[in-house]
Amino acid sequence: MEKIKTFFLMFVLTLLFVWIGGVFGGRGGMMIALVFVGLMNFVSYFYSDKMVLAHYNAVEVSENEAPGLYAIVQRLAKKAGIPMPKVYIIPDSIPNAFATGRNPSHAAVAVTEGILDLLNEEEIEGVLAHELSHVKHYDILTGTIAATIAGAIAWIANIMQWGAIFGGSRDDEEGGTNPLVMLVLAILLPIAATIIQMAISRSREYEADAGAARLTGHPEWLESALIKLENYNENGLLQGATEQTSHLFIINPFTGKNFSFASLFSTHPSTEDRIRRLEELKGSLKIEKSSENRGTIEDYFKQ
């Protein structure tokens, strides 16, 4: 079912992008947009994980190199019924984490050194359960495609704006586009695309939080982690953070930082709302204290 939803989203966003190409350049513009969005979806599907991991200088670690971290991911993956993802550590003191990969068989989870320093083992388990919930439900691919298409729409809108300023498209046998219409579309399309991306991302964050609570049986672990992460992230910025990749992280790297108008359209719901929903889940979950031996995150430092 998740695969169907993912490919349906790809299809709808492709149609939207092609329609915009038609508005801007007629039949020729539609063909160019179709080819362009096809290439974007291909790159997003097969290479977005490698690109984002390289962008943040993530280093893959083995069980021997980070036994405590690896053990948590391995245990959660087994409970979630998904293959063991690759594990990466980002050399950055700002605490954060994300998952990437087009499907559970090609997934990776990445955590910063800062999150290993800041959170205790249970809080890290809550964070990783959140990320593996994303992996299980194909949220990473969906979010990446939505972000890619939204960015492309903004790029086209910028071209349309300049076209409107210099008189719009030329009239030909297919008809031209009124400069005023182009200007209005140039303003509204990026906002609409961003709102759609925001709605998709926020919905998936709520679902991943709920998935983490069910996977661990302890919503309070994730609650505590979210509070610590938000407080810390307000005082620092992850190196190389971009708004195009902010949807991947468990906490938006730009939390509390008003760098641009786009920051008003956050890809994450507020931490207060996320905690409120987690609190509501407590009554419906059967909390069981596990006596399982978990190992410690401190093992990571015994390399």
Image: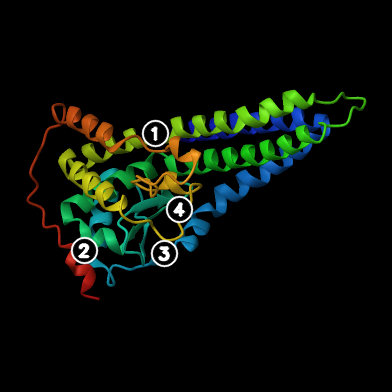
Instruction: Give whichever of discs 1 and 2 has the lower sequence position.
Output: 2
Separation of disc 1 and disc 2 at Cα?
30 Å
In the rendering, at what x and y percent does residue 233 appear? 31, 52
Separation of disc 1 and disc 4 at Cα?
23 Å
Instruction: Give whichever of discs 1 and 4 has the lower sequence position.
Output: 4
Residue shown at 11% from the left, 57% from the top: 293
- Does any portion of residue 229 appear in the rendered image? yes
Tag nearer the camera, 1 or 2 = 1
Q: Are marks 3 and 4 in contact (CB under 8 Å)?
A: no
Separation of disc 3 and disc 2 at Cα?
18 Å
Frontmost residue, 7 versus 35? 35
Quadrant where the C terminus sits is bottom left
Image position of 253 with respect to 201: above or below: below
Q: Are marks 3 and 1 in contact (CB under 8 Å)?
A: no
Frontmost residue, 247 versus 264? 264
**Would you name the residue on which mark 3 appears?**
58
Residue shown at 49% from the left, 61% from the top: 55
> Residue 134's quadrant in the figure?
top left
In the rendering, at what x and y percent does residue 297 appear? 19, 63
Image position of 194 with respect to 112: above or below: above
**Would you name the residue on which mark 4 appears?**
106
Amino acid type at circle 3 is: Ala
**Would you name the residue on which mark 1 appears?**
202
Separation of disc 3 and disc 1 at Cα?
25 Å
Label 1 sits on a secondary structure element that is helix
**Would you name the residue on which mark 2 appears?**
68
